[in-house]
Structure formats: structure tokens, C-alpha cells
Image: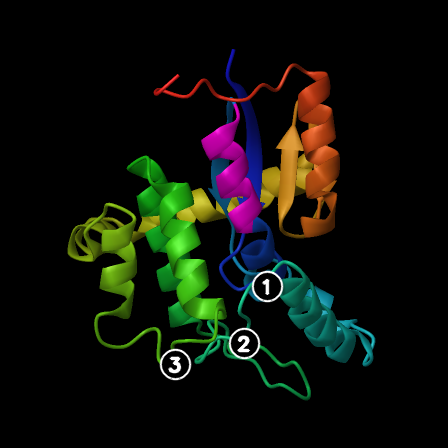
Amino acid sequence: MELTFDLYWSFRSPYSYVVLPRIVDLCANYGVTAEMRIVHPAAIRNPAYFARMDPIARPYFMLDSARVAAFQGLGFHRPIPDPIEQDPVTLTIASEQPLARRLGRLGIAAVERGQGLAFCSEVATLLWHGKTAGWDKGSHLAMAAARAGLELTQLEAAITADPGHYETQLAENDSALHAAGHWGVPTMVFEGEPFFGQDRFDVLVWRLKQRGLKLRVSSSA
């Protein structure tokens, strides 16, 4: 029987980027499916977090996210531009966030077309790998969508036709994350049990194996 877990995930989160290749490999090789639950970035869903952040937290966070990416063998650079418009010193968050909202809505549209994991993997790499500046310009997003088996123009047309639907889905995922027992991403939830952070991936796999996780049977066997 195929196992399933929810993956609460944000395009702006470096740890969400870092965990995703392992999630992709897990789902490709084992009898388990990750249900993508795209959420707003923390700057939108929980802006008070930055207001009370210790001044030493952000420098450590930036150091550690780069270190963990290197440990996992991933390229890493903060996205250019940052999906969230935020003062790097005061952490004041701009009232309008068009880039973050665009990404979130596109993620929801991809999920609704059954390609959420593939789309998030391609776009996260585009943002975070460090090979592309100006990810929001030109054909970068269109090419990422194509690699995931989607057409960007179709996704954006659907969003333009009913933007409120996509914002509602994002808000519902924000609330569901909190109801599942956490506030951060990535959070994986299996059988009601939350596993927060890329460093809990192996613990999730351990729990899945307790519930009968098996390798997929190769079609060439």
C-alpha cells in the first residue's frame, strides 16, 4: 500500500530547498507519496517572527543554510532577487510582496495539476542553486515549468482568472501547518506526527519504515 505524508514547503526557505532532492529520491524509489502543501513565506504568514528575532539569529541562519547545502552537495546562493522584499538590517517587511505571491500561486497551480513536487524542485533549484540571477526575468520560470511538464502561460492564465482561489489555498495550508503542530518549514506530517526541518528527514524515513515502507518494484525486474 502506498504511504503518504504532507510536505509543508516554502519557496523562500533555504532548508526547504535543501531537503527537496531527498524527498524526490524517496518518492521515486519507495512506495510513498509527498503531498505538497505550499505555504506563504514566514514573512507573510508570520511577520511577528521577525519582529522578535534575536539579532544573532539571522547571521547564524545564513551561515548554517549554506553549510547544510554544501554538506548535501548542493549549490547554494541566496536568490537574486529575494522573493521577499525585506530590509536586511531592520528586517522590516514591505507591505506588497508580488514575487512571493507569484511563486506561491504558481506552486498551488502546479500541485493542482499533479506536478507540484517536480515544479517545486525545478523552481527551488532555479532560485537557490546560484547559477541564475534574475530568476524572475526572461524565460527562466517558463523553462523550469517546462522541465516539470507544465506550461507557465497556462498556469498564469489560470491564476489571473481566479487569483482569490490560489490565495485561499495558500492561507488554508498556512492554517493546516499550524494545526499540524508547527509553524516552520519544511515540515513533513505523517499520520498526524510532524517532523520539522531538513534534519528530521531521516527520522521521517525511520517512521515510514516502521509503517511498512518498501522499495518500489522496478519495471525492468
**Pointer 1 residue:** 14
Task: Report the amino acid beneath label 1.
Answer: Pro
**Residue 56 percent across, percent down from the top left:** 82, 79
The secondary structure type at the circle numbered 1 is helix
- Look at 35% across and 20% down and name the residue there: 219
Q: Of marks 2 and 1, which one's residue comes earlier in the chain?
A: 1
**Pointer 3 residue:** 133
Report the side of 93 relative to 155 (left or right). Answer: right
**Pointer 2 residue:** 78
Task: Report the amino acid beneath label 2.
Answer: Arg
- Look at 57% across and 29% down and name the residue there: 5
Q: Is residue 47 visible?
A: no
| 136 part of magenta stretch | no
Stretch in magenta? 20-30
Q: Measured along the vertical axis of the image, is residue 217 above or below residue 48?
A: above
Which image quadrant is residue 182 in? Answer: top right
